[in-house]
Every structure is written in structure tokens, then in C-alpha cells.
Image (cartoon, rainbow, N blue to C red):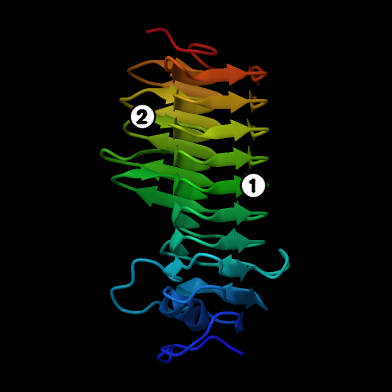
Amino acid sequence: AIATSANVIGQTAGESFDVRTARQLCAVAEYGAVRDLWFEQTRSLNAGSYAPAGAVSYAGTLAANSTYDGGGGDYTISGAVLPVFAQNSGTVQNVVLSGSSDTLAVSNIGALRDCAVEDANVAKASGTYALLACANTGSVTNCAIDTCALTLTGSATGALAIGSNSGTVTGVTVTDSQIRAAASAAGFVYSNGTGTISNCTISASSVVSQTGEAAGFAYSNAKTISTCAAVHTDVTATLSRAAGFALSNASGGSIASSYVAPGKTTETWIGKG
């Protein structure tokens, strides 16, 4: 079947739908209350070519036990000017978000896996923002950020991959990307609260804060970061502190088997204070 923008009352669990156009991507939002659906993207689509009036995302909420598959990574979603998902409660996999000006998921409480964000140019003025998930309480696995730019003005804070994390993040890479903020910013994750981050890397990237603090990998950590690295990533805080890896590691927080490779920074590893 093909996802349409028609009334979906009566759709049942176990059905599958092809997604070929931006209009059909937006139709996914109408299935948010239906579990156990499979959406398969079968060609590249330009999300910027269609968005319902007043929409805050394209695909809305993906229900628990439902899956959106980007076609095995063979196709792209391009031109997005809204988040693709407001909330992912199911599984989003094999999605390539290309040339976008917004995030893949505002909130991830399900699973993001084998996804990529490339050539994004995103600007935000409030909240905590990131390109894979602004807030993660689920799992993010084997995803990539490549050649992206995130510009944060006003009070906005954030990081390139994950904003706040209370879930698990594994095998995620950030490459050749930059984040510039008026307030504080980090390269990989802004805040790791009760989450676990492992086997992740940011490389050949830059983090700049004009008035706040800046960190190459994590602004703050309160739980577990292991086997991670900030490699050849420049970190600059014009008026405050900067750290090559993390600025704050709270009592009970653990940073293990992780390292910083040379990059320009005013402080390395854990910032003072």
C-alpha cells in the first residue's frame, strides 16, 4: 500500500506502506496512534516541496513497534525545513537526511539506527538542539553526521549529534562539521544525564561559543562516557572556558578509555572548576 493523506481511521497493525513523496511522508503523521506499521521509503524525496499548514514536523510521531525504513540507505530525504519526526517511539532506520535545515528527531524514545545527516545547515534561536535527536531517552546506534553546520543564536544551546541524553548512544560519528553558538555548546552531546555513550567520535570539526562555554565532546556528563574521542577538533570560547573533551563531569559521572587528539583549545580534558 501507499501512504496517503486520507483519513486513516480503521488502519490495522501489521500493514506496510510505501513512501515516495513529501506528501506521503507527511501522511505518516496520521498513523501516530496505530502501532506495528511498516513505512518503507522507496525513492529519494524532497521534503521541502510539501508541508501541511501549521505542521511542526513532517512525519509527526512514529508509534511504538512501528518502523520507518529509509530504503536501506539508498535514498535521501532532502530539503527539510522542519524536523522529520516530532517524536520517534518506534524504530527509524536507514534514513539519510541530506541538505536539511532541521533535525531528524526532536525527541527519540525509541530507536534510531544506521541513519545519517549530511550537508545540513541548521540555525536555531532557543532550546537545546542537535541534528540526530534534540532529546534522547531511547537508543541511537551506528549513525553519522557529516559536513554539517549548526548555528545557535540567542539562548539556544546544543551539540552536533545529541542534545540531552538519558538513553544509550553507540557507534555514532561526527565528521567535518561545525557548531557556532552565542551561548554554550559542545561538539557531540550537550548534556549526558543518566545515559550511556560509547564508541563515539567527533573528528575534523569545530566548536565555537561567543559568550558561553565550549567543549569538544560533551558540555556536561553525569553518567557514563566510554571509548570515545574528540580528534582534531578545534574548540573556542571567546569569553569563557573551553575544554577539548568535557567541561563538567559530575560526581558519579564516569569518562573512561576516552581521549583528545590535538586540536586548538584553551583547555584539554576536564575544564577547571
- Left or right: residue 209 versus residue 253 is left
Q: Residues within 10 Å of mark 2 (few under 14, many from 20)?
A: many
Q: Position of residue 245 (x, y in %)?
A: 54, 20
How many discs mark residues in the rendered view?
2
| Gap in angstroms between the C-alphas marked 1 and 2 | 26 Å
The foreground one among 195 and 51 is 195
The foreground one among 115 and 252 is 252
Q: Amino acid at mark 2?
A: Ser
Q: Between disc 1 and disc 2, whose residue precedes?
A: 1
The foreground one among 116 and 34 is 34
- Left or right: residue 129 versus residue 234 is left
Residue 184: mark: 2
- Left or right: residue 49 versus residue 175 is left
* Residue 258 against residue 31 in the figure, above or below: above
Please identify the quadrant where the N terminus is shown.
Answer: bottom right
Q: Position of residue 110 (x, y in %)?
A: 52, 55
Residue located at (41% from left, 31% from top): 185
Which residue is labeled 1 in the image?
141
* Residue 47 against residue 183 in the figure, above or below: below
| Secondary structure found at label 2 | loop
Labels 1, 2: front one: 1
Q: Residue furthest top?
A: 272
Residue located at (40% from left, 21% from top): 237
| Secondary structure found at label 1 | strand
Task: Report if residue 33 is visible in the image.
Answer: yes
